[in-house]
Image (cartoon, rainbow, N blue to C red):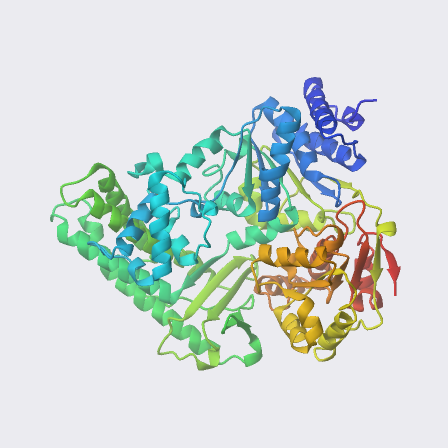
Amino acid sequence: MSILSELDFVSALNDDTKLSIQILYRDFLSARQLKPRLGQKQMIAGVANILSRIGDEGKAPCGFIEAGTGTGKTLAYLIGALPVALEREMPLVISTATVSLQTQLIEKDIPDLIDATGLSVNWALAKGRRRYLCPIRLESALDAVNEESGLYPDELALVLDSDERMLVDGLSRAWIEGSWAGDMDQVPDQLTDTVRAALTTDHRRCQGRQCRSFQICPYFTARESWLDADLLVVNHDLLMSDLKLGGGVILPPLEKTILIIDEAHQLSRVAANQFTDHVRIAQSLGAIKTIERVLTTVRSVLPESHRIRNEVERVPGSLDLLARQLADWGRQTLEQMQGYPESEFAFQNGGSRYRLRLNDQMSLPEREGEAAVQIINRLQKILDWLKGISVQGGDEISETDAEGLAEQLGLAMGRLESIPLVADRMSRPCIEQGDARWVRVGQDVRYATQDDPTDLEFWVSPMSPAAALKEAIWGRIGACVLTSATLAHQQTFDVQASSLGLMDFSSLIVDGAFDYARQGRLVIPQQSGDPRDELAHPQRVNDYLESRVDSGLGILVLFTSWRLLMRVQELMSEQLREVVLVQGQLTLSSLLDTHETQRRDGYTSILFGLQSMAEGLDLPGDLANEVVITRLPFQPPDDPREATQAEYLKIHGRDPFREMSIPAATIRLRQAVGRLIRSETDTGQVTVLDRRLVDTSWGRSLMSQLPSFRLEM
Ligand code: SF4
């Protein structure tokens, strides 16, 4: 029997490709002296099976594969997909959600596979424009550092402090000397958001091929290598940015791509964020002022008969009207909201947030004059003209000045471009398409006055990205495998498929490699209770943790909110405080280093973290002997997207708790529980302090989807 007999069932793959996959797996195993794993073989065959249908009746084959912890799924999809991609000359694009998986792929899994098998594959890591130096931005930043504000100053001189100026200076020297290639992730110093913003650019401001620094541009140099790559590693954000631009703009053409989406349970959230738009009144008014400044300069140098003169003359009047319209929108909205009860507002970063109901409207007041979209079209013509001059020169204005003005105009236009869409969605009920919409005021809404409507933001997000993804990707992609350790709900992929708008798919569930019944326990201690009791529950959590202070164990404690975490912190004894490390106190790597040192020396070490630590965190062996779930991980009820979706389902006579909240909480809980057993030799316990897991029927159904630990109560 061949090492990969499962492939015999993949009839549509040709014999050469099957053989290539078998040889690749065999060579890898023999080089690393490993034995074949059943789950890994099943997954390799599952991937090959999906890809074997490329070209069938013009349909793009897509399939879900849930592969339990310990399957070795990264290697499985690389081995299952690479020979097919190479044979068909289709680039293989792997998209991940977390930096840790991306790092594991590029630093370990891919080099290891190539090293062990001698596979000839050209591969690259693709990152967004913001993760590369823009040499044009660097020049502007240096002007600011040297306080040569130039003819057309921007805001940099005002915002860089002395440490940041020194950092910019140092990076500039490294760039000129050639010791730094412009990859922002390779800067040894901690970059502040201000420095990153000062040295990088976005698609709106970037001048692309017309740029005088195009030949040395780190982003475009990297992009060249992506186009030739057989294998490209990306993240979900970049994948979604590319889709938002139409697909195949940053990444290879979708139709020719074999796409593997790892950590696919996160795709829907990332996609919804990417398709979210907002308008900040203050920022838009600032942008309008910048545009007026740029236009004044342009007008002063343009001859009367110039072809662009008409646009330059007409825009200021329209902009003035737009500014008044935006301010009125803010005033009117504040007035409307001040009639709402306080309970309708959620607290958010020192401000307040109101979620619009599906029937609500907050219309942009109508005015005579050009609509925002027409103004943007006119501005685009002026921007194109400035960009042209910055490359070819012109009689009216120097190349450098045109470049500076184009930069500022592009940035300001970017801040206005969401207005048409956001104003449209805010202005009509959303009963049918169900967009989530909310307004954020930067302070407590009770104290906001209508005299200053600028501190207001309007947000619009698709309740679900299904429709956008259906149009953008599923009908176009060459082939796609969606995988994760946690994708299925009640053994089906229907919930995921519906949230992603994927109608036609195959599915496979591969069991993990661990013997959970032998390796772990699920403990519901006596002190557990109902976490909705906000007074008693923090005390219960604290009491339980106090009992673990002398355990000599590595413990990961997961919270669903900062509020509960902080409440428990307030209750902790001095002794407990000494062994607790809290997410956010240090950088994640420093936090984990400290935890590791404590554990190596045999001391109790307890990590406190939120949902982000429940995913992608690898704490093998004694780093996590116990995982404590303080509360079942339901999304907070005030999350505007989920709350709108719940309202939408209720209106349509459906049950949002069963259809939405339970499946999402199940995935989160399975992710959290998955932190415990990371290898065949790991043992330990998951402790759940939320009694609803055993006291309610939905809790018991949720528990039935967890790994088969021994239950102790
Ligand atoms: S092409 Fe020019 S503007 Fe665009 S990122 Fe590169 S250097 Fe910056």
Q: Quadrant of the N terminus?
A: top right
Q: Is residue 194 above or below residue 513?
A: below
Q: Say which residue appears at 26% left-offset and 64% top-offset.
A: 320
Residue 562 placement: quadrant = bottom right
Q: Residue furthest top?
A: 16
Residue 541 placement: quadrant = bottom right
Q: Does residue 338 appear in the picture of this structure?
A: no
Q: Nearer the viewer, residue 623 or 676?
A: 623
Horizontal and vertical percent position of residue 129: 43, 45
**Total of numbered circles in the picture?**
0
Q: Nearer the viewer, residue 543 or 693?
A: 543
Q: Residue furthest left?
A: 304
Residue 389 placement: quadrant = top left
286 displayed left or right of 337: left
Horizontal and vertical percent position of residue 229: 52, 30
Q: Quadrant of the C terminus?
A: bottom right
Q: Say which residue appears at 50% left-offset and 43% top-offset.
A: 243
578 displayed left or right of 453: right
307 displayed left or right of 427: left
Horizontal and vertical percent position of residue 35: 79, 31
Horizontal and vertical percent position of residue 358: 56, 65
Q: Is residue 202 above or below residue 316?
A: above
Q: Does residue 485 appear in the picture of this structure?
A: yes
Q: Nearer the viewer, residue 460 or 599?
A: 599
Q: Say which residue appears at 80% left-offset and 35% top-offset.
A: 38
Q: Say which residue appears at 18% left-offset and 54% top-offset.
A: 297
Q: Is residue 30 above or below residue 346?
A: above
